[in-house]
Image (spheres, rainbow, N blue to C red):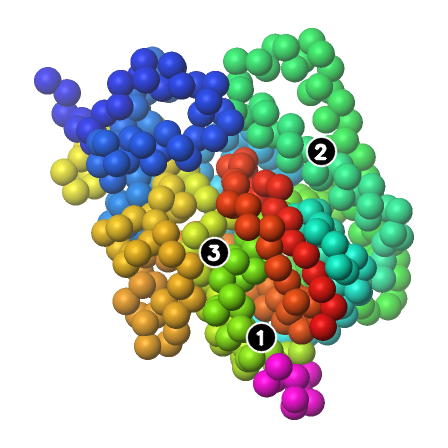
Amino acid sequence: MSKYTYPNKVPFYKFLLNANSMAKNPIVFHNKWFNEVGDTFAIKSPFYGYVVLTRDVNFTKHVLQKQHRSYRKSKIQTTYLSKYVGYGLLTSSGDYWLKQRRLIQPAFHKEKINDLVSIINNTIEKQVDKIEPNSLVDLYPIMNELAFKVVAKSLFNFSAEKEVLERLQFIIEKLQLFIVKELRMPYKKLWYYLKGDISYHMKLVKESRRIINSIIVDRRKSNQSHNDLLDMLLHVQYEDGTTMSNQQLIDEILILFVAGHETTANALTFTLKLLAENKEVLRKVEDEINKTSLSSLSPLETIPQLNYTKCAIEESLRLYPPAWITDRVNIEDDSIEDYHLKKGTMIGISIYELHRNKKYWNNPEAYTPERFLEENRKEILPYYMPFGAGPRLCIGNGFAMYEMILAVKTIVKKFNITSNKDSIKINPLITLKPVDVKLKFNLK
């Protein structure tokens, strides 16, 4: 008899029967099996051994927080993803990750992000001015452009030409789409090789790295200070007084682009759609924004005054967390509750399902920003993880919240937003992407 015990199992043949549909939208099947089998279930693969999927908060906290030293990110991120986006904070693990995290963390301290607020706000205002009024428009491309420009300006400020950044944006979006195809359908890998897809995308990787390297080289030669993230990253020092090499900087900058713009674009798209469909919530957000507009506050001073707006964004992140799932692999045998897991077990943590689990949330499908008001926060925060949890909590969460609050403020102040009433459709890729969300922006 095996000494290992696993949660209730979903037969592997069910996984095989639904493989093509799952490649398009695994959330549907995750939800079905969670409801049928329980908040944690296992699938035994003849190729990879056991895969465990959970939406249980105790299981999640054990893996991400309490016993995090016994778990590493899987090869999906550390090997397959890193070959396209570099070996930065998102894709590295172990001692190297810890060394990089300690090095880069100070660049994302609140005081440092405060210095970037004027850059963030000015970039948002320029992008919002480009929105075409009085017609129904596809929202995601607008938010994607806005979020990319914010990351680019915050990283490089005045160091890169518009055409160069547009090319970099094109490459990153192409890479993200292909990464998902390769991860979801590994059985087509030979076909991708024969077709030339892999060589084409690896050429794009090399081009993106050349673009970023040229920006770094130019900045190193310059004696000017730009007060942007690149300046901070160039000057942070390891304990021995050395700084990051160009290759390390490229890795980290690529990760910041990939993790920092698409997730925010997704979140802003979902938030604006939810606001447009929930008129009472939108009215409260508008009232709060109008109130702050009456006083001559700087963008940095405005952010703490927009508490209900922040709650509206946080509730959107609960319903539609951009980082909708995360994974870990145990590097040694481990016991969680009644289970004893063999070393090498893949654990999938569904943040999307955890955020909608009826055990933890009252009326979980409803959009209710009041959940996040100060008097209610203590009760719900243990179950809320849009930026992850534990030591690998997203390093840019403060940056992202500042950006989203300022973006919602700028848009709602300028426009009356209305929806076409279509239901929200999602595409769970590496991040949770909105599909075909259309809004109308009428000038106030």
Specify whether 48 is left or right of 132.
left
Q: Amino acid at mark 2?
A: Lys
Residue 293 on the magenta span: yes
Foreground disc of the pair 2, 1:
1
- Residue 133: give x, y in percent of width and height: 77, 60
Q: Helix, strand or loop at disc 1?
A: helix
Q: Which residues are magenta?
A: 290-298
Q: Amino acid at mark 1?
A: Glu
Q: Which residue is mark 3?
A: 317
Give me the disc on residue 164.
Answer: none
How would you rate the neighbour count of disc 3 (Cα within 10 Å): few for under 14, some for 14-19, many for 20 or more? many
Residue 235 on the magenta span: no
Q: Nearer the viewer, residue 138 or 268?
A: 138
Specify whether 387 is left or right of 113.
left
Rendered residue at 65%/15% (across/down): 192
Q: Helix, strand or loop at disc 3?
A: helix
* CB under 8 Å between discs 3 and 1: no
Q: Nearer the viewer, residue 263 or 249?
A: 263
Q: CA distance from mark 2 to mark 1?
A: 37 Å
